[in-house]
Image (spheres, helix red, strand yellow):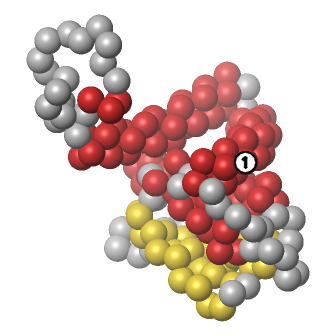
Amino acid sequence: MKELSDYSGDFKQDIQFKDFSKESLIDLLNMYCRFYKAIDGFWYLTVMNKVDEKTAIECDIAVWDKQFRYEMKRITQLLNIKGKDLTAFLKCFQFNPWSWNAKYKIEFINNNSALWTVFRCPTIESLEKEGKGRDKVFCKSVETRMFESFVKSFNPDITVKYLKLPPRQTKEDICCQWEFKLNKSTG
């Protein structure tokens, strides 16, 4: 059977992912990653609007803490990523759906230190567009705690700290920059 580039033809009772071209599957995967990000935003805003922002933040962090542990275990197994060092963590981090939503660069300073610079972040772009000023505080109050949870779910000896956070002066500025460090020699 010819690989499908889309599903515009006849209905196929037994359609499977393997029936599609690599390019179509990559597009679909990217869209699934955007869905992942969107559902987070939808439920966060729902809790914030029905209860309050403090409760939404507490729920957000609690949910992501569980999700990160779930993700890390499955990503390392599926991609056969070994060890608990910084390189292994960043390999997993690259395949987290959250990371796929951003445009970024990872730079290793040395084996125990790396920088993650984000050039495009859908969350910040949405908060800037919203215009309520939440882009000035969200990353410091929420993303910092989420990243801490994320690295701890992989290896408690890895730390993360922000070097630059929003608000951006212009849309051309980087969105944020984070430093990841492995504090003990683990492998």
Q: Nearer the viewer, residue 99 or 185?
A: 185
Q: If the image is split into quadrants, where does the C terminus sit? A: bottom right
Q: Residue furthest front?
A: 1
Mark 1, residues whose alpha carbon is within 10 Å: few (<14), some, or many (≥20)?
some
Q: Is residue 161 something that shows in the picture?
A: no
Q: Residue furthest bottom?
A: 110
In the rendering, at what x and y percent does residue 25 appear? 31, 40
In the rendering, at what x and y percent does residue 63 appear? 74, 37
Q: Nearer the viewer, residue 64 or 58?
A: 64
Q: Is residue 179 something that shows in the picture?
A: yes
51 relative position to 2: left or right: right
Q: Nearer the viewer, residue 36 or 18?
A: 18
79 relative position to 28: left or right: right
Amino acid type assigned to the residue bearing label 1 in the image: Lys
Q: Is residue 130 above or below residue 170?
A: above
Element at label 1 = helix
How many numbered marks appear?
1
Q: If the image is split into quadrants, where does the N terminus sit? A: top left
Query: Which residue sits at x=62%, y=90%?
Result: 109
Q: Is residue 29 above or below residue 87?
A: above
Q: Which residue is mark 1?
A: 73
154 relative position to 81: left or right: right
Q: Is residue 121 above or below residue 113?
A: above
In the rendering, at what x and y percent does residue 32 appear? 43, 37
Query: Which residue sits at x=32%, y=46%?
Result: 26
Query: Which residue sits at x=65%, y=61%?
Result: 81
In the rendering, at what x and y percent does residue 155 appear? 82, 64
Q: Is residue 82 above or below residue 95?
A: below
